[in-house]
Image: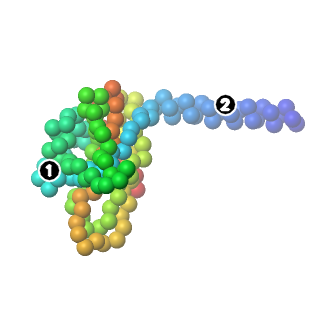
């Protein structure tokens, strides 16, 4: 009986291990940093693609929203080594937060950026919800945005 339980346990571990390897070979996780303290400019044009490769492109869309204190500085972006993936939602008077979930590279060598949208209460003012992540340039590729419900 002990041998049977041992064999079942070993089989379970091998099965779980092979499933994990299949998932990892399917989509490779890519590290990123969420950029803080930026806002979408009123003069910004529609974002045609989520990747932004240069400071000039970035500055045409986003402004710095610095405030006092240690966490008040906008996250630094070095476009010689990094690019950003940005999501901009339509202007709204509903409190809206975009949250990064994951960034992976799929078998087709495309990036898949998964994020969520959390809506709250109505506000007395409007906002343009946005999310910016910073990624190393070596991972630059076409991006598929996936909004997780």
Residue at far top of view = 138
Q: Residue at x 35, y 53 (%)?
A: 69
**Figure disc tally:** 2
Looking at the picture, the colour scheme in use is: rainbow
80 is higher (above) or lower (below) than 63: above
Element assignment for label 2: helix
Residue 85 can be seen, yes or no = yes
90 is higher (above) or lower (below) than 61: below
For marks 1 and 2 on the same chain, the one whose residue lies earlier in the sequence? 2
Between residue 11 and residue 91, name the one nearer to us.
91
Q: Residue at x 20, y 41 (%)?
A: 58
Q: Residue 47 in the image: state x and y as whole percent.
A: 19, 46
Between residue 131 and residue 141, name the one nearer to us.
131
Between residue 17 and residue 102, name the one nearer to us.
102
Q: Residue at x 36, y 45 (%)?
A: 34
Residue neighbourhood size for the residue with mark 1, other residues' Cα within 10 Å, grouped as few (<14), some (14–19), many (≥20): few
Pointer 1 residue = 44
Element assignment for label 1: loop
Q: Residue 90 in the image: state x and y as whole percent.
A: 22, 58
Label 1 vs label 2, nearer the camera: 1
Residue 144 can be seen, yes or no = no
Residue neighbourhood size for the residue with mark 2, other residues' Cα within 10 Å, grouped as few (<14), some (14–19), many (≥20): few
Quarter placement of the N terminus: top right
Q: From the viewer's perspective, is 6 left or right of 32?
A: right
Q: From the viewer's perspective, is 52 left or right of 10?
A: left
Q: Residue 9 in the image: state x and y as whole percent.
A: 75, 35
Q: Residue at x 42, y 43 (%)?
A: 102
Residue 14's label in the rendered image is 2
Residue 32's label in the rendered image is none
66 is higher (above) or lower (below) than 81: below
Q: From the viewer's perspective, is 86 left or right of 13?
A: left
């Amino acid at each position: 009986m002990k041998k049977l339980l041992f064999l079942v346990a070993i089989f379970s571990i091998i099965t779980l291990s092979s499933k994990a390897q299949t998932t990892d070979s399917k989509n490779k996780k890519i590290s990123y940093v969420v950029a803080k303290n930026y806002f979408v400019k009123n003069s910004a044009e529609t974002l045609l693609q989520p990747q932004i490769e240069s400071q000039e492109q970035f500055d045409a869309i986003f402004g710095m929203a610095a405030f006092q204190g240690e966490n008040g500085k906008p996250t630094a972006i070095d476009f010689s080594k990094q690019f950003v993936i940005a999501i901009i939602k339509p202007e709204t008077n509903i409190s809206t937060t975009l949250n990064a979930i994951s960034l992976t590279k799929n078998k087709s060598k495309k990036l898949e950026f998964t994020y969520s949208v959390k809506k709250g209460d109505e506000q007395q003012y409007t906002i343009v919800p946005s999310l910016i992540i910073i990624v190393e340039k070596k991972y630059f590729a076409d991006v598929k945005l996936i909004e997780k419900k």
